[in-house]
Amino acid sequence: MLLSLTTPITFFGGKGGVGKTTLAAAFALDASERGGRTLLVSTDPAHSTGDILGVSLGGEAREITPTLHAMEIDPEAEADRYIADVKERVRQVASPRILDEVEREIELARTSPGAEEAALLDRFAELMRLAGSAYDRVVFDTAPTGHTVRLLSLPELMGRWIDGLVSRRRKVRSLGRMWRNVAGAAAGSAGAEDDPILDSLEERQERFRTARALVTDPERTAFVFVLTPERLPILETRKATAALERSKIPIAAVVVNRVLPGEAEGAFLARRREREARYLEEIDRDLARYPRARVPLFDSDIQGMDGLRRVIAALEGAA
Ligand SMILES: Nc1ncnc2c1ncn2[C@@H]1O[C@H](COP(=O)(O)OP(=O)(O)OP(=O)(O)O)[C@@H](O)[C@H]1O
Ligand SMILES: [Mg+2]
């Protein structure tokens, strides 16, 4: 069920600690072995993707196997990189007279709400484009739910944010032009119409539009929700799936992870299993509209390729 998803782009989301990173890595490994060049992208600041794969990862893709590459991106670093990039572009074209003012404006944008998300989304958009070119598939392991849902609805949200910035920028510029006219300065002289900020904002506006079109297209993007059969993850999943549906982001599958295995024995586990059975029923009822898979609780943490293969085998059994 999960392993038969074939969209070029797959996102894994869910509450903290439910197994997103583990399942995204297992899924990516399986996808890469079925013949598709696969890129696994993690936005997890805790670097657990690298831990699972037993390598250290950074902002550039690293080869894990010939068909599986992986990277970890850091939202803060992305935002800083983006700001530095804009500043550099501005420095090249802005006149020294307005440079200070423009730099202040950029700094302001860096600390304004949404800047980090915008930078991260920008990077996502860039990586999403690799699905179908440098890679056959790109698998995103995202940060815990609240954040993920926000991020995925971002093309929409950010679209508005950027639209706001663009129109503000346009206003500032037309005011500036008016002022120059009144002051009798050489309005319209060569280069006066260049606006690197506006250009970069508009470029971004366009990228968000493309990203939005991609994440809402079920042929291109699948969103997989991971949860455990427990009260809080169920509540959070209910909210998050509703939020994604509102954003018109299709949910392709739900994975129920850490289901107590049948062979586990003892009075304590029997009680737990009873409770779990109720939660599993609740999940089956609540999330009936999505394809579901179950992964058992293993007797140890999942580490390395062998660990991932155990997860894949469990998913194959659940198919
Ligand atoms: N089915 C399972 N059986 C046993 N251990 C598991 C199982 N699934 C995940 N784990 C272990 O649980 C821990 C958390 O899993 P993982 O890092 O995948 O969760 P996460 O949702 O990515 O967490 P975070 O929200 O912090 O990013 C890891 O140590 C992992 O090895
Ligand atoms: Mg994780």
Image (cartoon, rainbow, N blue to C red):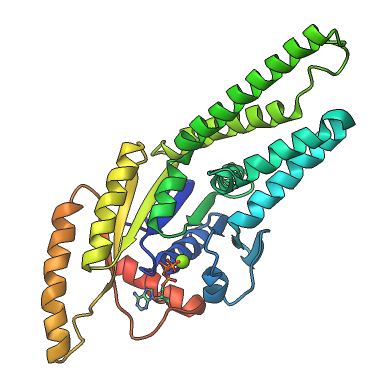
Q: Find residue 24 and report its horizontal and vertical position in percent.
A: 45, 62
Residue 276 in view, yes or no: yes
Q: Is residue 182 left or right of residue 174?
A: right
Q: Find residue 262 and report its horizontal and vertical position in percent.
A: 18, 81
Q: Is residue 135 above or below residue 282?
A: above
Q: Is residue 237 left or right of residue 58?
A: left
Q: Find residue 6 and report its horizontal and vertical position in percent.
A: 42, 49
Residue 95 in view, yes or no: no
Q: Ligand 1 quadrant?
A: bottom left
Q: Is residue 303 left or right of residue 135?
A: left
Q: Is residue 303 above or below residue 252?
A: below
Quarter occupied by the C terminus: bottom left
Camera-side residue: 199 or 307?
199
Q: Residue at x 82, y 17 (%)?
A: 192
Q: Is residue 175 above or below residue 27?
A: above
Quarter occupied by the N terminus: bottom left
Q: Find residue 182 and report its horizontal and vertical position in percent.
A: 78, 7
Q: How many marks?
A: 0
Q: Residue at x 85, y 7 (%)?
A: 184
The residue positioned farthest toward the front in the image shown: 183
Residue 107: name its quadrant.
top right
Q: Residue at x 25, y 49 (%)?
A: 290
Residue 77: name its quadrant.
bottom right
Residue 228: name its quadrant.
bottom left
Q: Residue at x 43, y 78 (%)?
A: 302
